[in-house]
Image: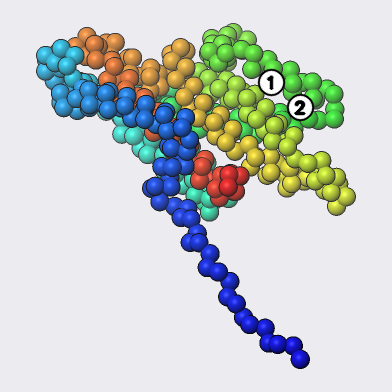
């Protein structure tokens, strides 16, 4: 008769390593190895050397009131933020009529509100598209004038509203065109493939400044006599066509990452070309290229500053106008450009953080 088996409990395992906390974050990100540790210590040393002097210049000895006499008395011993207090309306709204600047303020708030609403994944759908259509119609009505409002020509639009309009409009128009170009470059029809490749290589081979000059100054020469297109619309279309060429290559990279077996499976199920692209290929390709797409959006947002060369004064151009005509504040351009840089940084940082959030939601980040 077999002896009964004695139950022996398994030995206790060690406590699982904590995967969260400040100590683990520091070890993984700042002191992972000797090279990372050395770089961290070097940056800390430089920060200890430079940050006190920077804080002293930017805060302790700075002038925050709009007093140019007090700013001149600083003799470069501190920052003159008074130039922002004095010139913030021309910087933010450009040459828009002073009495009507409540209109570009409402436009800016409306566009920012729509961007925030668009960042909510649950809001995607037909309602969001209708809200965007209504918001853009409201933007044009407020900025241009209508329904009893004083008309304001687009040449006087400027500042932050113009930057947002060019960025949003340029990317909204570039994305559908970029998808068609990417699909066309992978087409089996040689004529379509060659035409799309020619367009992409031609646009990518010239700088954006050249495209803006063509749209603003050369394109009107080819129009019939007595017919004209608004300069803002021409520049917006030029920016859109330029961005589409770069986005097309980003999307084409995502299309090439889709296994051919999925296309064959879709064909076996009886799906034609366009349903296959819309339901199977494009969702995966856009998800895979999300970081690159967001990088292109950020680049376009910053490249809108180049429209100053065609006399459309967005943020940087509005700052130049605000300071060039006032010799009392002209010498404090550094503080003005730091203010503009802070606005651009906030916009780019918000886009970057939204991209990371969207990546986590769509599970495109493959890190362990």
Residue at mark 2: 185
Query: Does residue 258 show up?
Result: yes
Q: Position of residue 113 (x, y in %)?
A: 41, 43
User: What SS does tag 1 mark?
Assistant: helix
Q: Which residue is mark 1?
A: 200
Mark 2 neighbour class, 10 Å CA radius: few under 14, some 14 to 19, many 20 or more:
many
Residue at 19%, 25% (x, y): give it: 56
Q: Is residue 98 visible?
A: no
What residue sits 54% from the left and 45% below the top?
358
- Work out whether 184 lies above or below 234: below
Q: Residues within 10 Å of mark 1 (few under 14, many from 20)?
A: many
- Front residue of 305/216: it is 305
Describe residue 227's horizontal placement relative to residue 119 as left or right: right
Residue 151, image x, y percentages:
39, 26
Give whichever of 212, 271 is nearer the camera: 271
Tag 2 near tag 1, CB within 8 Å: yes
Picture coordinates of residue 45 (x, y %)?
31, 27
Side of 20 relative to 297 (left or right): left
Label 2 sits on a secondary structure element that is: helix
Q: Quadrant of the N terminus?
A: bottom right
Picture coordinates of residue 174 (x, y %)?
60, 30
Pick the residue in front: 5 or 273: 5
- Compared with residue 156, is residue 17 higher up or lower down, i.e. above or below? below
Q: In the image, what residue occupies the spot 57% across and 13% down?
A: 207
| For residue 209, above or below residue 28 | above
Labels 2 and 1: the sequence-earlier one? 2
């Amino acid at each position: 008769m077999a002896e009964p088996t004695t139950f022996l409990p398994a030995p206790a395992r060690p406590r699982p390593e904590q995967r969260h906390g400040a100590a683990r974050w520091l070890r993984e990100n700042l002191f992972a190895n000797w090279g990372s540790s050395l770089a961290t210590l070097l940056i800390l040393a430089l920060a200890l050397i430079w940050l006190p002097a920077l804080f002293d210049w930017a805060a302790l000895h700075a002038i925050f009131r709009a007093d140019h006499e007090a700013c001149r008395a600083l003799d470069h011993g501190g920052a003159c933020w008074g130039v922002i207090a004095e010139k913030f309306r021309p910087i933010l709204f450009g040459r828009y009529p002073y009495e009507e600047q409540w209109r570009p303020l409402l436009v800016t708030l409306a566009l920012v509100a729509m961007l925030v609403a668009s960042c909510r994944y649950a809001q995607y759908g037909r309602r969001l598209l209708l809200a965007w259509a209504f918001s853009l119609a409201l933007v044009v009505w407020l900025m241009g004038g209508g329904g009893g409002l004083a008309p304001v020509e687009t040449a006087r639009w400027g500042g932050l509203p113009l930057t947002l309009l060019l960025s949003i409009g340029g990317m909204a128009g570039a994305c559908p065109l970029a998808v068609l170009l990417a699909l066309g470059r992978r087409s089996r029809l040689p004529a379509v493939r060659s035409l799309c490749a020619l367009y992409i290589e031609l646009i990518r081979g010239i700088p954006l400044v050249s495209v803006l000059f063509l749209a603003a100054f050369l394109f009107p020469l080819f129009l019939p006599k007595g017919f004209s297109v608004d300069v803002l619309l021409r520049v917006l279309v030029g920016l859109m066509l330029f961005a589409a060429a770069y986005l097309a290559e980003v999307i084409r990279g995502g299309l090439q990452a889709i296994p051919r077996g999925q296309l064959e499976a879709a064909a076996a199920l009886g799906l034609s070309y366009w349903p296959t692209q819309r339901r199977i290929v494009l969702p995966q390709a856009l998800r895979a290229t999300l970081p690159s797409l967001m990088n292109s959006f950020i680049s376009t947002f910053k490249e809108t500053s180049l429209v100053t060369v065609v006399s459309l004064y967005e943020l940087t151009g509005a700052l130049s106008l605000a300071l060039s005509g006032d010799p009392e504040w002209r010498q404090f351009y550094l503080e003005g450009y730091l203010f503009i840089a802070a606005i651009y940084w906030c916009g780019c940082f918000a886009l970057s953080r939204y991209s990371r959030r969207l990546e986590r939601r769509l599970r495109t980040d493959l890190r362990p």
